[in-house]
Image (tube, coloured by chain):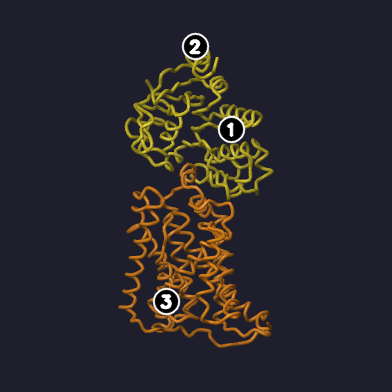
Chain colours: A yellow, B orange
Amino acid sequence: MGERFLEIEGLVSGYGAVVAVHGIDFVVDAGKVAALVGSNGAGKSTTLRAVSGLLPTVRGSIRFEGEEISKLPADQRVDRGIVMVPEGRLIFSQMSVEENLRIGAFAPRGRRQTAQTLETVYEMFPRLAERRRQAGGTLSGGEQQMLALGRGLMARPKLLLLDEPTLGLAPMMADTIFEAIRSLVSEKITILIAEQDVTRTLQQASVGYVIENGRIVASGSGQDLLIDPSVKAAYLGI
Amino acid sequence: MDAFLSGQLLFSALVIGSVYALIGLGLNLVYGTMRLLNIAHGDLMMLGAYTSFWLLSLVGLSPILSLLIAALGASAIGAAAYFGLFRRQIEISGPVEKLEANSLLLFFGLSVVVQNLAALAFTASPRAVPYLDQVFRVGEISMTANRLLTLGVALALCAATVIFLRANIYGLAIKALIQNRDAAKIVGVKVERVQLLSFMLGFGLAGLAGVLLSMTEQISPFMGFPFTIAAFVVIITGGLGNLTGGIIAGFLLGFIEIYGVVLTSQNARSIILYGVFVAILLLRPQGLLGGRRVVR
């Protein structure tokens, strides 16, 4: 078996003494969308945060393009192309939209092409271009999500970690975000997504993992999981 | 009332205000990015003032050149303090409140050590730097060139810092770290490097302010403390971590001090300053210009 793009083995992680993920294994292939599915508190966010380096890897391994990265600090993972768009967006509310985007290109991989990427992001989200001088905190929830996504793209990511990108957004805004995700896939950016809109997420995902109580309890292609009776019962409310 | 409207007072208020803005800015950089309460800030100024004094009296170097040397020296002390004392503290302290408390004690220790070493090395006798102190008149206003120089340099340094924080990627990173530490990590900001930079910049600005003050104030090993207090008044009034708010607050403090003294008496100076400060904290605990910012 050759090297995988992202390979997680026996990952244990959590907040301080509270372990939220108890040894999970999964893989993500290059250029694909992988989805983590599960109820609130199942461990999806913890997993994404561990991959991004915001939370420590207590045990287990995270290999990215064949190299062990679980001990690297967050900024060095960004240097390698792993970029997180966090739940709650965490934009810089007192900085202008454009400053928010420019700081997204802090890592050397993005900094060299700041101007071009900025153009691309503004083309993708014209709303951000209109508001480039406005403070980030004055944007609506949906616009802030665009900003967080745009900021993530400024680093020229290979792997984008999306944590609840449409949580709390109006349906129209959610459509815009899902559309953006589709266009990213066509640009060969790999995506690992945790999202409460299970149906739409699994429709786009080539592989999905169902997490319960910090463990993976089912996996399969997005389509298979969509018709899986237990997934339907638990997450689709059917 | 004539005196109240004179350009003379306006000029004095601008000069002292610009120095307050400068020391507030330096303190804010260290507090904002790392939540470290640097009560040795005024002592760094004191070292800058002595740099100016000794270089002038021993080798005849103009305070204008001392600015550069004091800035470099104070930055080096900042780097040493970061690596020697604070980097580990920031890593291990956990909650912000604990880090603030620990840093207060560490900086207090540093302040006492620096003051006493300075007293040993330089003696406690007050010194002065006579430089560009001839009085001349511009219209109604009599001034000295060193005050004009102080105003010009302090304004230029504040402006340069603000521009750096807007235009440079490391400047943006400092602002990002002040606003949201987790988010800064997510976007790949090299947190350690930016913290070191904030230390060097903050300490360096204190050293520069010290050289400026050496030309108009009496120099002694214990001169720093009132300025530490003034710097804290400035950054709390402007909103902790709010850099431009702090600059405005610095000038505000200068005006309150000068006009307050004119309306009452020289003896009331401290009472006015701290009275206003306490009033602001009672009415607006987030700082006069703190606005929406949540002070953590």
Q: Please state which amino acid type lies under the numbered disc 1.
A: Gly
Looking at numbered disc 3 in the image, what kind of residue is underneath it?
Met
Q: State the image coordinates of residue A215 (x, y, percent, origin top left).
A: 39, 23
Q: Are marks 3 and 1 on the same chain?
A: no
Mark number displayed over residue A168: 1
| Above or below, A91 relative to B146 | above
Residue name at image x 35 percent, y 61 percent: B105
Q: Which residue is mark 3?
A: B223
Task: Report the front residue among B255 and B31.
Answer: B255
Residue B80 visible: no
- Both on one chain, marks 2 and 3? no
The residue identified by callout 2 is A229
Q: Return the x and y of residue A90 as percentages of the image width and height.
A: 53, 42
Question: In x, y percent, where is residue B193?
Answer: 42, 52
Nearer to us of marks 3 and 1 is 1
Find numbered disc 1 in the image and state the secondary structure of the residue it sits on: loop
Alpha carbons under labels 2 and 1: distance apart: 27 Å
Q: Secondary structure at mark 3?
A: loop
